[in-house]
Amino acid sequence: MQGIEGKLRTLIDAEAIAARVKELGAQITAAHQGQDVVVICVLKGSILFCADLVRQIDLPLTIEFLGLRSYEDGTETSGVVQITSDLTKPIEGKDVIVVEDIVDTGLTMQYLLENLETRRPRSVKLASLLHKPARTRVPVTIDYLGFTVDDVFVIGYGLDYAQRYRNLPFIGVLSP
Ligand code: IMP
């Protein structure tokens, strides 16, 4: 990629991502039979994962988008989260699947899952492409997990560094 030649190392290639997303889609299809499923795509990081995942789920689901901003305290999320763009429909009585790019400290998802519970959905499950268990500050149950990663800053396939590199088709690590 222009500007970061020689600094970018592939961590999870596009083929491995596609294979895992296919498995997760099959798992979700089997687990949510007969349900009224709403997939919530958390902006912006999960757009690529969500777009690929929903194509592997064979259910008559609907898709909603939700924008979140996590305020940073030094290098990590402070736990103060703002909804910058909310759902367009109520989720009362619905079976919600939240699709997130990465669970790092867990603070962002803890906030969002608690917020969604107040809207009285029938069920809420979390699908996350990545999890960094070494950084956990609050435990969050990930029902559908793509990959576990070490404590490194990852970019690509939706994940950004200063809003760039979301369009990389694989997950990589930037070395200094
Ligand atoms: P948490 O609240 O600490 O779990 O942070 C979650 C959010 O931080 C994610 O939705 C990402 O937007 C961002 N984030 C955490 N780790 C990384 C990373 O390695 N690369 C890019 N974004 C990250």
Image (cartoon, rainbow, N blue to C red):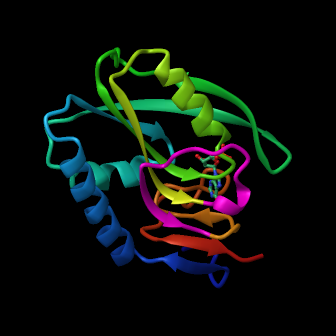
**As drawn, is 148 to the left or to the right of 41?**
right
Name the residue at 69% across, 43% down: 138
Residue 90 place in picture, x, y as percent:
35, 14
Q: Percent x, y for residue 152?
A: 69, 68
Above/below status of 108 relative to 13: above
Task: State yes or no: residue 146 in magenta.
Answer: yes
Report x, y in % for residue 141. Answer: 52, 46
Q: Is residue 133 left or right of residue 50?
A: right
Q: Identify which residue is drawn at 40% across, 15% down.
A: 120
Q: Residue at x 20, y 28 (%)?
A: 36
Q: Residue at x 65, y 52 (%)?
A: 104
Asked if residue 115 is positioned above or below residue 32 in the image, the reply reads: above
Residue 29, percent across and down?
Answer: 20, 49
Quadrant (top left/top right/bottom left/bottom right) for the C terminus:
bottom right
Does the magenta segment cover residue 6? Answer: no
The magenta segment: 132-149
- 4 and 89: which one is in front? 89
Q: What count of labels does the image hold?
A: 0
Q: Give the quarter of the figure containing the N terminus.
A: bottom right
* Observer able to see residue 27: yes
Residue 84: which quarter of the image?
top right
Residue that extends furthest to the bottom in the rendered view of this protein: 6
Using the rendered image of the protein, determine whether residue 3 is visible from the camera's viewpoint: no
Residue 167 horizontal side relative to residue 53, left or right: right
Snapshot quadrant of residue 150: bottom right
